[in-house]
Image: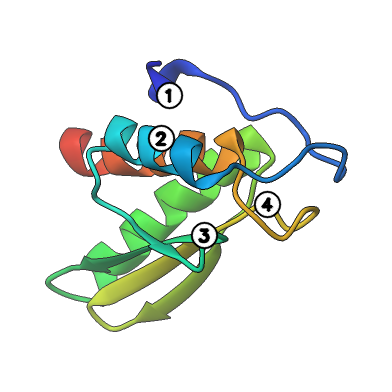
Amino acid sequence: MDLVNKKCIPCEGNVPALDETKIVMYLEEIENTWSVIDSKKLYKHFQFVNFGHTMSFVNKVANIAEEEGHHPVLHISYGSCEIELWTHAINGLTENDFILAAKINELLKTG
């Protein structure tokens, strides 16, 4: 699927949420590094050595989110960041969430 090279498509609520089968398929594409909450949200906890590293990561995530037009919920503390992804318009998961997760995963590989 190569989610990292896909672009998020704006969602105005006119698409169904992914079913469990598709969620499992997409999770494999992001190397099962994210958790799924209630079949509605992706969640991942990131640990860093200090606040500077955390904020550097958060700023990179923010740039990607703006480019994609798909915005996560971020919980930031001194040496960590928790990210939740879901498509708010449908209160569930779409391909967009997995595209953004794949791009966030890529940040950790490329620095």
Q: Which residue is mark 1?
A: 3
Q: Which residue is mark 2?
A: 26
In terms of secondary structure, where does tag 2 sit?
helix
Q: Are marks 2 and 3 in contact (CB under 8 Å)?
A: no
Question: Which amino acid type is marked by label 4?
Answer: Thr
In terms of secondary structure, where does tag 4 sit?
loop
Q: Which residue is mark 3?
A: 39
Question: Which amino acid type is marked by label 1?
Answer: Leu
- For marks 1 and 4, the one nearer the N-term is 1
Q: x%, y% of residue 106?
A: 28, 35
Q: x%, y% of residue 91?
A: 72, 60
Q: x%, y% of residue 40?
A: 57, 60
In terms of secondary structure, where does tag 1 sit?
helix
Distance CA(mark 2)–CA(mark 3): 12 Å
- Tell which of 48 and 4 is nearer to you: 4
Residue 83 picture quarter: bottom left
